[in-house]
Amino acid sequence: MRVMVIIKADRNSEAGVMPDEALLAAMGKYNEELVNAGIMRAGDGLHPSSRGARVRFTDSGTEVVNGPFAIDDGLIAGYWLWQVESMDEAIAWLRRCPKPMAGEPEVEIRPLFEMEDFGAEFTPELREQEERLVARMAEQAASH
């Protein structure tokens, strides 16, 4: 089971406040544990929404809205992608995480869709295409 672990943004992350050395060291150690356990697939922090944009799709085309965005819009400050056996395992790993920011940060865990979740609509041709794309992405990642 793949999950995305989402660290929610707060006033500090949106102000561009960077973590101190102690938190960077604690997170580095935690990330190393995740990698050593074969759990972590990816993870990064995100710049404040003031450096981002949203593209809104409408019936007449697209509209670009530049940041910043309201914190109550569910902004993300960082994420991990994990491969776990179950949601219980993901929760157990997240309980071991150093507190990621000041205050009372909220971290969300969401399962990713897998090919089998799409049912019959995900035809053999579409599955084959997806498998080719995943393989190409892995090749590209390995070469960079």
Image (spheres, rainbow, N blue to C red):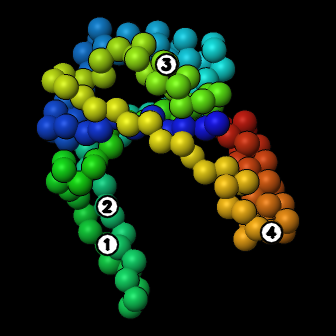
**Within-10-Å neighbours for mark 1: few <14, some 14–19, many 20+:** few
Mark 4 — residue? Answer: 123
Q: Residue at x 46, y 13 (%)?
A: 30
Separation of marks 3 and 1 at Cα, in angstroms: 37 Å
Which mark is drawn over residue 64? Answer: 1
Q: Is residue 135 above or below residue 88?
A: below
Query: In the image, which is nearer the foreground, mark 1 or mark 4?
Result: 4
Identify the residue under disc 3.
Answer: 93
Separation (CA) of disc 4 from disc 3: 35 Å
> Disc 2 vs disc 4: Cβ atoms closer than 8 Å?
no
Mark 2–mark 1 distance (CA, rounded to whole Å): 7 Å
Q: Are the residues tagged 3 and 1 within 8 Å (C-beta)?
A: no
Neighbour class for label 4 at 10 Å: few (<14), some, many (≥20)? Answer: few
Q: Give the residue displayed 54% in from the left and 31% down from the top.
A: 87
> Disc 3 to disc 2, how far (Cα)?
32 Å
Task: Give the mark nearest the N terminus, 3 or 1.
Answer: 1
- Image height of 134 relative to 64, above or below: above
Q: Position of residue 1 (x, y in %)?
A: 64, 36
Q: Which residue in the protein does label 2 denote? A: 53
* Secondary structure category for the residue under label 2: strand
Q: Report if residue 20 is visible in the image.
A: yes
Q: Is residue 111 left or right of residue 135?
A: left
